[in-house]
Amino acid sequence: MPTMYKTPISVLVVIYTTDLQVLLIERADKAGFWQSVTGSVEATDASLRDTAMREVMEETGLDAKLYNLTNWQVVNEYEIYAHWRYRYAPGVTHNREHLLGLELPAPVAVKLAPDEHVRYEWVDWREAAKRVFSWTNVDALRRLGEQHHLTL
């Protein structure tokens, strides 16, 4: 049976409200590591939008079709942490991450996937930018602010 490796193409979905409260989720495998929804493209995904909708549902229980999901047309490339490279084919060292946003009218309760995340919080977008662990997540939050003519 062939080994299934992750595709080095992923999405990062910033879930936020009209007043710029941002949903952060804490990783189960790294205490204190907060992030937005992320996930790799899978063979069954017909588009990045499909990947984003699937990951939002898997990680939060939210149906992205009920809200405003937009592709921000931004791609960040980053080096995959060495301790996670076993998930990828040999020789793969970098990932291309596409940024999307999901706007909700107000904060809602979410249902986390306990094997992936242990807690969630809705926080102001500037506070979120201080708490997320990846530079691509900080970049996404900076861009969220810029879309509303605000700066970090």
Image (tube, rainbow, N blue to C red):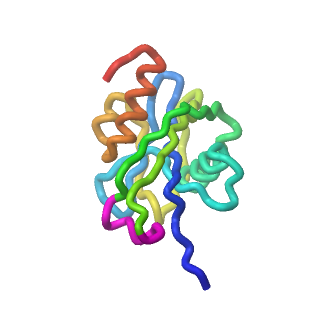
Q: Residue at x 54, y 34 (%)?
A: 101
Nearer to us in this view, 140 or 117: 140
x then y, percent, for residue 3: 55, 78
Residue 75 in the image: above or below residue 120? above
Find residue 81 and report its image quarter.
Answer: bottom left
Nearer to us in this view, 137 or 90: 90
x then y, percent, for residue 72: 54, 31
Residue 33 in the image: above or below residue 92? above
The span picked out in magenta is 81-90
21 to the left or right of 65: left
Nearer to us in this view, 137 or 4: 4
x then y, percent, for residue 92: 43, 63
Q: How many marks?
A: 0
Q: Is residue 59 magenta?
A: no
Principal SS element in the magenta part? helix
Q: Residue at x 41, y 23 (%)?
A: 145
Q: Which quadrant would the N terminus be assigned to in this image?
A: bottom right
Q: Is residue 88 magenta?
A: yes
Residue with the most extreme front position: 91
Q: Which quadrant would the C terminus be assigned to in this image?
A: top left
Q: Residue at x 31, y 47 (%)?
A: 133
x then y, percent, for residue 49: 65, 43
